[in-house]
Image (cartoon, rainbow, N blue to C red):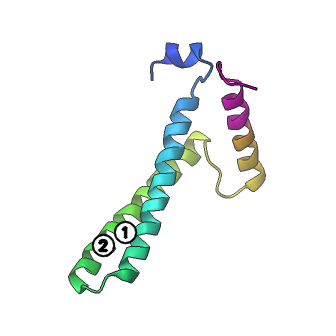
Amino acid sequence: MNTLIKNVIGMGNMSDQVIATDFLIYAKCGVQNYAVAITEITSPHVRTVLRGQLNDAIASHESISNFMMKKGYYNAYDMKEQYQIDMNTTDTALNLPGNAK
């Protein structure tokens, strides 16, 4: 998103955080879905293919998590800090123009 537009609507750098968070959530869902699928599949060949995709999904989740921690968007090791990040994000979302209060 254009920096000017982000600043005008009051999001600043929040859109980058939102996109990264969505990506992290979808990566986590992918890991869960592959794991469940592996337990349901009876074909050894398909199970092998899914294991490879599961490993790729785990690697993607790790990369996204590391990126988010480096940027200060996510703190997996300090719940108080993560709570503060979440509260700041929530406050920003609630104060966006057009939100009904």
> Which corner quadrant of the image does residue 52 belong to?
bottom left
Query: In this picture, is 96 found above or below 56?
Result: above
Residue in the image at 64% along x and 20% along y: 98
Answer whether residue 84 is magenta in the image: no
Which residue type does callout 1 highlight? Leu
Q: Are marks 2 and 1 in contact (CB under 8 Å)?
A: yes
Answer whether residue 93 is magenta in the image: yes
Residue in the image at 50% along x and 42% along y: 20
Q: Is residue 9 left or right of residue 3?
A: right
User: Mark 2 sits on what residue?
Assistant: 50
Q: Quadrant of the C terminus?
A: top right
Q: Position of residue 3 (x, y in %)?
A: 50, 18
Which residue type does callout 2 highlight? Leu
Q: Position of residue 47 (x, y in %)?
A: 29, 80
The alpha-carbon separation of the residues under discs 2 and 1 comes to: 6 Å
Query: In this picture, is 16 found above or below 23?
Result: above
Nearest to the observer: residue 44 or residue 101: 101
Magenta extent: 88-101
Nearest to the observer: residue 64 or residue 50: 50
Q: Position of residue 48 (x, y in %)?
A: 26, 79
For residue 54, which numbered disc appears in the image? Answer: 1
Query: In this picture, is 39 found above or below 89?
Result: below
Provide the secondary structure element on which disc 1 rests: helix
Provide the secondary structure element on which disc 2 rests: helix
Q: Is residue 49 left or right of residue 54?
A: left
